[in-house]
Image (cartoon, rainbow, N blue to C red):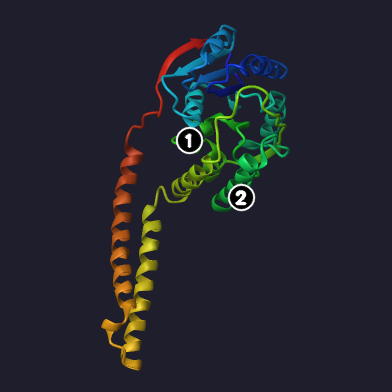
Amino acid sequence: MKPVISAVIPVYNESESLPGFGAELAAALDSMKLPHEIIWVDDGSRDGSFDILKGFSAKPGQKALRLSKNYGQTAALAAGIAEARGEWIVTLDADGQNDPEDIPRLFAAAASGVDVVSGWRRSRQDAFFSRILPSMTANAIISAVTGVKLHDFGCTLKIYRAELIKSADLYGEMHRFLPAILGYAGARVTELEVHHRPRTKGRSKYGIARTFKVVLDLLTVKFMGEFITKPIYLFGGISFAMLGAAALMAAYTLYNKFANGVFVKDQPLFLVAIFFAIVAVQFAFMGLMAEVLIRTYHSANRRPPYSVAERAGTD
């Protein structure tokens, strides 16, 4: 029977948390009385996590994938999503901080007529300065730039309509932007407050350095969301703005020459105007080149950013 819900869990060196978390997850899904499957994706763990996952995969409705190296959480999620057969796909972290008992509530909210329900860790159990404060800052920036208003983009506990998330291209560190990416595609996105538990086993794999990655990835998301089919609008807009600034500076230089008798050679602003004009022409040509590349991008076959080294469990 085709599952209604597919749970996708990326795993990286979580051997201490897996036994208890695996039992909790299975119990939460069983309580829903709906056909379901659990897909574990080992993202190159070195602590024996995959041995535990192979034990899980011996149970009906569970499977485990082992990626050939540590590709990152986005690639691990992409691998699990590609394997999922359910109508809805729920994603969770394997460290035990996400509460599997929130899944029925997320599913109920999704079934009410939306496409994405994002978890909101309102009472987050993490260090404030190293985890919570950078996350709050990043969430505010992402909401402002993308127009998708969420309190907690970084929460992995989310549920998606499968047909939408399977159509999304996941590369780099884009998993945290999935609601925004799908929002650009017209998905109905909402959020639901979920439980967040303190980590009791293992240690976090993330540090404050990821905040800078978020900012860089946000530029990509903004471009891919609004300009991927019309890059000439972005680069052409910058070009026209710089040409306009160059024209104003050149006009002011001429005004100074004829009104105040200041020779052009004595006005550095004229050199700045020439520089702006040259850069404007370059941006215009960059826009044309981007248009060609985008058309190639849409017509080319795409390869997933991972390779599966081993499979175990049900199909």
Locate residue 175, reporting x and y percent.
52, 35
Q: Is residue 276 left or right of residue 149?
A: left
Q: Is residue 148 above or below residue 310?
A: below
At numbered mark 1, what does the secondary structure look like: helix, strand or loop? loop
Question: Which residue has dot 1 on it?
Answer: 168
Front residue of this view, candidates 264 and 314: 264
Q: Is residue 183 above or below residue 262?
A: above
Q: Is residue 161 above or below residue 144?
A: above
Locate residue 85, reporting x and y percent.
53, 21
The residue shown at (46%, 21%) is 44
Question: Which residue has dot 2 on it?
Answer: 140
Front residue of this view, candidates 126 and 286: 126
Number of residue marks: 2
Locate residue 226, reporting x and y percent.
46, 50
Q: Quadrant of residue 107?
A: top right
Point out the residue furthest to the left here: 265
Of badges 2 and 1, nearer the viewer stands 2
Give amino acid for label 2: Ala
Give amino acid for label 1: Ala
Locate residue 244, reporting x and y percent.
37, 72
Q: Earlier in the sequence, mark 2 or mark 1?
A: 2
Mark 1, other Cα within 10 Å: few <14 / some 14–19 / many ≥20: few
Q: CA distance from mark 2 to mark 1?
A: 23 Å
Mark 2 vs 1: CB contact within 8 A? no
The residue shown at (36%, 56%) is 232
